Amino acid sequence: LPPGGEWYDAKIFTPTLGVMFFKPKELVDSLFLQTDKKLVDALDDRPVVAFIVEGSSARSAGVELGHVLLKVNGIDVKNPKEASRLIKEGPRPLPLLFYVPDTQVVVAEGEHMVKYNTKETGAPNSAKDWKPKYVVIGGIIAQPWMMNMYRSKVSWTVFLVTFDRCWWI
């Protein structure tokens, strides 16, 4: 593992963790956009938390975006697929060991008021012209310059669940 960073233990009691893991190299255009290439390379293919379901056991245990799963029930984890298997098969409560790399994670999503369906570039004249949307810039499924809008974070989550590249755990 790269020098620096911190380790912490977490326990989950539910059948699922409520996260999606990706390999570090798959996140260089999103979460690890500002991360040094040497750090990304040093993480090998270890599973990195790329999405967390609100209210999940992972969120309750303090797991955040960009955290790296090292061990499940004392067993070293080398990639997202192995992490998925070990978490699904493991006993409950299930002990996990995470590593927090010493880097700035880029999060380019959130609730915003937007104006669309017009060529005007100025702000709307009234509040009724604004629409609340969950906006994702780039992210784990798009190019860094792409913007996607969803009705809510729940809509974004539903989309990710149906996206066939996901490793939901």
Image: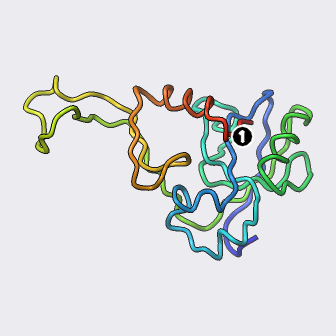
On the picture, is 96 further left or further right than 129? right
Q: Residue 84: x and y, percent?
A: 81, 41
Count of picture labels: 1
Crowd rating for badge 1 (residues with CA inside 10 Å; few <14, some 14–19, many 20+) = some
Q: Residue at x 22, y 34 (%)?
A: 115
Say left or right for 108 vs 97.
Answer: left
Which residue is at the front of the view, 169 or 8? 169
Residue drawn at the location 21% of the way across and 32% of the way down: 117
- Give the secondary structure at mark 1: loop
Q: Relative to 69, is 42 above or below?
A: below
Q: Nearer the viewer, residue 116 or 36?
A: 116
Question: Which amino acid, by three-letter code, is at mark 1?
Answer: Trp
Residue 110 location (% of width, % of height): 41, 40
In the rendered image, which quarter contains the C terminus? Answer: top right
Which residue of the protein is positioned furthest toward the left in this rendering? 125
Q: Residue at x 47, y 53 (%)?
A: 143
Residue at numbered disc 1: 167
Residue 160: image location, x then y, percent:
58, 34
Question: Up-down: is 21 above or below 126?
Answer: below
Q: How is the image coloured?
A: rainbow
On-image quarter of the N terminus: bottom right
Q: Residue at x 65, y 76 (%)?
A: 38
Is 29 located above or below residue 169 in the figure?
below
* Figure quadrant of residue 3: bottom right
Quadrant of residue 130 in the image? top left
Q: Nearer the viewer, residue 76 or 81?
A: 81
Hey, which residue is sitting farthest top in the picture? 128
Q: Quadrant of residue 126?
A: top left
User: Would you say 34 lies left or right of 150 here?
Assistant: right
In the rendered image, residue 129, in percent from the top left (x then y), is placed at 16, 27
Left or right: 96 with respect to 36?
right
